[in-house]
Image (cartoon, rainbow, N blue to C red):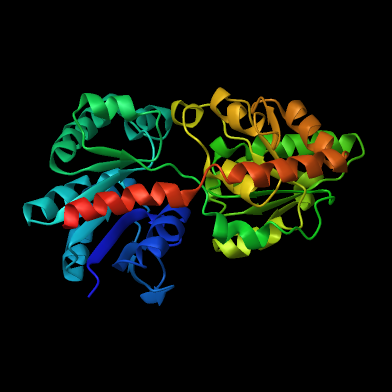
């Protein structure tokens, strides 16, 4: 019989790219995989048992109750190894360890620094101190996985048992979407979390500037549009002029979203500068390369080394709508250049493979479960 492993997330959707498509689907070949995450129903999908978890809208309740409720759901699974994906689940992980369970803590971003980047968080120094207190105890109790190299030094100083598993691309999954319907269309694309930090306001202004120049560009956006960002977009002075050019498709599966991408000419990755983003690779960057979609990306050095280094897109100042507009236009008006970027991206994607990263996970799991 396969050994049972359980992935836990109280924040991410069950269909999260890293958790479901990268980890769980691959692990299910060797293990009996259960996933407890935000989801509407209890079901089995692609061989993975998904148990729904309610995400609290109230942030205080989320911090106080989530770990406790997750612990009881997790214990019912009776897994041999538990894989946590959210910092608020650290107390749950510590309790699982107390019960004699094997636990892995997956750190998707530099959470400690992220506290200072989020304007809605009050008493940042106090929260940072509390987080650091629990984090140090977690590091001593369980191995950790880091999604980026940028915060390796922080955890090495703590003496962590760490493994870096980068968000590279699962090439076989994306291959069906690399055959475009039309890459010469006047459409641009983004799929992912919709936050102010993802540059939607700057892209909207770029569309407005292009419209004033006589260029009508349609923007396909896949993801859940939260009320706060929707209000900010509607408050833009030019919103009425370009609102019909932005198509919000809502939350879709990864497959459904990338079907839409096949009829677009440019992938957008306009992430605003924050401590986490400047030093972390965006998943979109590799996904666009894997489907041969030319991209316009923020001009952080880390991004430039890959996007412009591989010739798969153009890097711009993410705070400059005029620069964003010019880059979009440069790709759309030059089909030959776009085709070169498409081919370069497809070739480059073969260097950044999830299969190689997954081998590290198998090694870690094998060590813990032996």
* The C terminus - image quarter: bottom left
Q: Viewed as shown, does residue 249 lie left or right of 169?
A: right
Quick one: 33 or 247, which is closer to the camera? 33
Quarter of the image for residue 349 reads top right
Residue shown at 58%/46% (left/top)? 350
Q: Which residue is drawn at 89% across and 41% down?
A: 215
Figure check: 19 above or below 274: below
Query: Which of the pair 195/306 is nearer the observer?
Result: 306
Q: Position of residue 170 (x, y in %)?
A: 51, 54
Residue 76: where, in percent of width, then height?
17, 70
Q: In this view, does 353 lie above or below 326?
A: below
45 up-or-down from 17: above or below = below
Point out residue 245 in the picture as x, y percentages from the top left corner.
Answer: 78, 50
Q: In this view, does 199 lie to the left or right of 26?
A: right
Q: Is residue 219 left or right of residue 168?
A: right
Image point (21%, 34%), residue name: 160
Q: Quadrant of the N terminus?
A: bottom left
Whether residue 66 is visible here, answered yes or no, is: no
Choose top left, top right, bottom left or bottom right for residue 339: top right
Farthest right residue?
214
Residue 206 x %, y %: 76, 35
Count the marks: 0
Can residue 6 be seen by looking at this rendering? yes
């Amino acid at each position: 019989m396969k050994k049972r492993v359980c992935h836990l997330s109280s924040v991410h959707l069950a269909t999260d790219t890293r958790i479901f498509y990268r980890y769980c689907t691959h692990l299910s070949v060797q293990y009996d995989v259960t996933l407890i995450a935000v989801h509407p129903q209890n079901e089995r999908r692609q061989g993975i048992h998904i148990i729904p978890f309610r995400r609290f809208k109230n942030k205080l309740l989320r911090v106080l109750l989530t770990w406790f409720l997750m612990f009881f759901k997790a214990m019912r699974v009776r897994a041999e190894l538990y894989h946590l994906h959210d910092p608020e689940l650290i107390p749950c992980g510590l309790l699982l360890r107390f019960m004699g369970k094997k636990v892995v803590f997956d750190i998707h971003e530099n959470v400690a620094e992220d506290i200072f980047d989020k304007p809605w968080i009050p008493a940042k120094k106090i929260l940072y101190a509390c987080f650091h207190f629990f984090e140090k105890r977690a590091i001593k109790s369980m191995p950790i996985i880091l999604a980026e190299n940028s915060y390796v030094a922080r955890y090495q100083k703590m003496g962590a048992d760490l493994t870096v598993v980068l968000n590279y691309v699962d090439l076989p999954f994306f291959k069906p979407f690399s055959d475009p319907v039309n890459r010469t269309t006047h459409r641009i694309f983004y799929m992912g979390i919709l936050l102010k930090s993802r540059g939607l306001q700057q892209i909207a202004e770029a569309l407005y500037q292009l419209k004033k120049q006589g260029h009508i560009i349609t923007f396909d956006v896949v993801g859940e549009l939260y009320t706060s960002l929707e209000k900010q977009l509607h408050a833009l002075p030019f919103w009425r002029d370009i609102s019909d050019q932005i198509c919000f498709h809502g939350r879709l599966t990864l497959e459904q979203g990338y079907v839409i991408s096949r009829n677009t000419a440019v992938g957008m990755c306009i992430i605003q500068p924050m401590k986490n983003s400047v030093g972390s690779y965006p998943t979109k960057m590799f996904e666009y390369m894997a489907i041969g979609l030319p991209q316009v990306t923020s001009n952080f050095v880390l991004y430039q080394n890959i996007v412009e280094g591989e010739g798969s897109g153009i890097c711009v100042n993410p705070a400059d709508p005029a620069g964003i507009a010019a880059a979009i236009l440069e790709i759309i008006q030059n089909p030959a250049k776009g085709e070169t970027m498409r081919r370069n991206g497809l070739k480059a994607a073969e260097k950044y493979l999830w299969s190689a990263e997954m081998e590290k996970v198998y090694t870690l799991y094998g060590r813990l479960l032996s």
